[in-house]
Image (cartoon, helix red, strand yellow):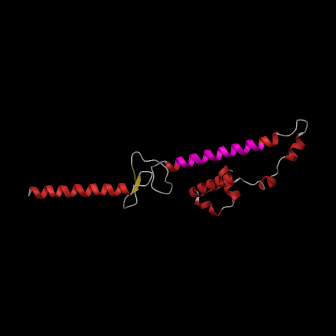
Amino acid sequence: MKLFGVMLGLVLFVSLAGSDRAAAADRNKCGCYKDGAGTCFCDKKAKCGCPGDCEPKGCDEARNKELQKEIEAETKKAEASQHRKAGGQGQGEDDSSARDQAPSPKKAASHRLSAAQGKQLAKLIDLYLSDHPDARGSSIEEVRNAVAGH
C-alpha cells in the first residue's frame, strides 16, 4: 500500500511539472499566456510589447499615453515650422504682405509628406483606429477634430 501512495505522488508530481512546462512553452514574447478559458496570466517580470495579445495590465494605457505624447510633439513641431515660415519674412514688410504670403489651407494640403512622415502618419492612424474602431467610417476631418478635442 505504501508503494501505491508513492507511485500516486510521483504521477501527480510529473503531471503537474508537465503542465507547467506546457504553459511555459505557450508564453508569448512578453512572458504571458492564456489558459483554456482565455484568461491571461503573466510572469512577474513580464513586459509590454504584444499589442492585441496577452500582455501585462497597464500596457494599453502606457501605449495610449505614448501616442498622445507623440501627437503633441508632432503638433508642436508643425506649429514651430509654420511659425518659422511665417516669421522668415523681411523686416521692412508689413503684416498684410506676410498674411498674403502665408500658406493657405489649400496650399498646405498640397504639401507632400516624406516617406518617413507617411509611415509615421500611417502608424499613428492605425494606433488611433485600434483604440477607436467606431471611427473607421468617419472622414479624416471628423477624426482630426476628435483627436484635437474640438
79 drawn magenta:
yes
Describe residue 49's horizontal placement relative to residue 7 as left or right: right
The structure residue drawn at horizontal position 81% and vertical position 42%, both measured from the top left corner, is: 86
| Foreground of the two, 58 or 91 | 91
Q: Which portion, as a residue range, is magenta?
A: 61-82
The structure residue drawn at horizontal position 67% and vertical position 49%, both measured from the top left corner, is: 148
Q: Which residue lies furthest to the top in this view?
A: 91
| Foreground of the two, 85 or 40 | 85
Number of numbered markers = 0
The structure residue drawn at horizontal position 67% and vertical position 52%, both measured from the top left corner, is: 116
| Foreground of the two, 24 or 75 | 24
Q: Is most of the magenta stretch helix, strand or loop?
A: helix
105 drawn magenta:
no
Q: Residue furthest left?
A: 1
Q: Position of residue 111 (x, y in %)?
A: 77, 53
Describe residue 63's horizontal placement relative to residue 114 as left or right: left
The structure residue drawn at horizontal position 70% and vertical position 43%, both measured from the top left corner, is: 77
Q: Position of residue 58 (x, y in %)?
A: 48, 48
The relative height of residue 80 versus residue 1 in the rendered view (above or below) is: above
Q: In which quarter of the image is the N terminus?
A: bottom left
The relative height of residue 4 versus residue 66 in the rendered view (above or below) is: below
Q: Which residue lies furthest to the bottom in this view?
A: 137
| Quarter where residue 6 is shown | bottom left
Q: Which residue lies furthest to the front in this view?
A: 115
Q: Position of residue 97 (x, y in %)?
A: 90, 43
Describe residue 24's horizontal placement relative to residue 90 as left or right: left
The relative height of residue 38 versus residue 82 in the rendered view (above or below) is: below
Q: Where is residue 95 in the image (x, y as percent from the top left)?
A: 88, 40
